[in-house]
Amino acid sequence: MTHPLSDRISSLPVSQTLAMAAKARELKGQGIDIISLSLGEPDFNTPDFIKDAAIEAIKQDYNSYTPVDGYVELKEAICTKFKRDNDLVYQPNQIVVSTGAKQSIANVAQVLLNPGDEVLLPAPYWVSYSAIAILCEAKFVEIPSSIDDDFKITPAQLEAAITPKTKMVFFNSPNNPSGSIYSEKEYRALAAVLEKHPQIYILSDEIYEHINYGVKPFSFAAIENMFDRTITVNGLAKAFAMTGWRIGYLGAPEWIAKACTKMQGQITSGTNCIAQRAAITAVLAPVEKVQYMVDEFETRRDLVLELLGEIEGFKLNIPEGAFYVFPDISAFFGKTVNGIKIENANDFSLFLLEKANVATVTGDAFGAPNCIRMSYAASVVQLKEAIQRIKDAVS
């Protein structure tokens, strides 16, 4: 029996990160000792000073519907953060608070894209970018890169990908899944291309901004001629270990912010009141208050690179941010490993799940078919054990 689902949902791919996480949970439920390196979620607890702010909000009886675009106090705090951290001057009427940065991105796409418009996705890219474009009936166009280029595209590649139908380009730095960070010089070179194409809008996803290892990210909107065409998206999930609190936000030209508020008003309305009150405290907190998490991630990154570097066939770069490594494992393609034929990254990821009991995510999901993504948002003990299992399985 067929079910009368819409073409929209039928054409939508399943999130590979969530699918792998579900598969790992299923195997764990069967009693199999799975180490999951698949989800992009910090393994720290939300800092106490943020939890205390939420408790205080409950005591003060915050329990009513919130403004669609967020509490004024939170939007003002976000403006302060943008100026402090990014040298970006936004007004509260240019800020929209949403239920996670994913909703912020989806809102922007929905209000700017028409059927047939093209969205440029420098690859590798976060899995939901392409799905969001599909939901808008737009066409996503991948701009490939490789580990040899540190997973960054060039101005020439960007120029070659632009057509009269190009409406948006999505940038993500620090990048998920590669951990790469575009420098100010690299972003300005890309902006020089986009200056010639005023019909193109830029979405700059900066959710991993504070998780960097000595290389401070640069905001694309800080480029003078790009500010009025750039939507800056950020949130609290990663740096503040607040994934389940679902707080994301954007800064944009006022006309785009108003359109996003209109869109959100018909879908979710305003974001959770308690999470918003806690977010004021988080956004205004000095970055040093979460530096302990960043320091631990850097220690784990160095450990993972050292251990994976001992496994023949894993080609590595040094990620400068986020909490992922994205090795090129194409050396295994065409080989039979432990009795299993490896044809592509999906095969290799499933092989690691079945033979090493380690969950990763295929690079196909990110537009990089030669790679797999491994999150090091796990304990040192788990990371050592996972990589030893991988080493044993492929040796």
Image (cartoon, rainbow, N blue to C red):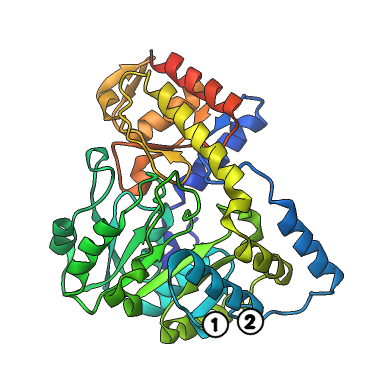
Comparing 289 with 394, the one in front is 289
Residue identified by numbered label 2 = 72
SS class of the residue under badge 2?
helix
Q: Describe residue 91's horizontal placement relative to residue 183 as left or right.
A: right
What residue lies at 51% left-to-right and 28% top-to-bottom?
358
Q: Is residue 352 rendered to the left or right of residue 41? A: left
Q: Is residue 300 visible?
A: yes
Residue 70: x and y in percent read: 62, 77
Secondary structure of the residue carrying tag 1 is helix
Q: Which mark is residue 186?
A: none
Identify which residue, 197 or 12, lies in the foreground: 197
The circle drawn on residue 92 is: 1
Instruction: Give the residue type that dot 2 points to.
Output: Val
What percent of the width, then of the height, locates residue 390? 45, 21
- Report x, y in % for residue 11: 39, 60
Query: Are the residues tagged 1 and 2 within 8 Å (C-beta)?
Result: yes
- The correct choice, above or below, for 116 with respect to 379 in the image is below
Residue 71 makes an appearance in the image: no
Question: How dense is the environment of label 2, judged by Cα within 10 Å: few (below 14), some, or many (20 and up)?
Answer: few
- Of the image marks 1 and 2, the number of the one nearer the N terminus: 2
Q: Position of residue 35 (x, y in %)?
A: 57, 29
For residue 78, above or below residue 394: below
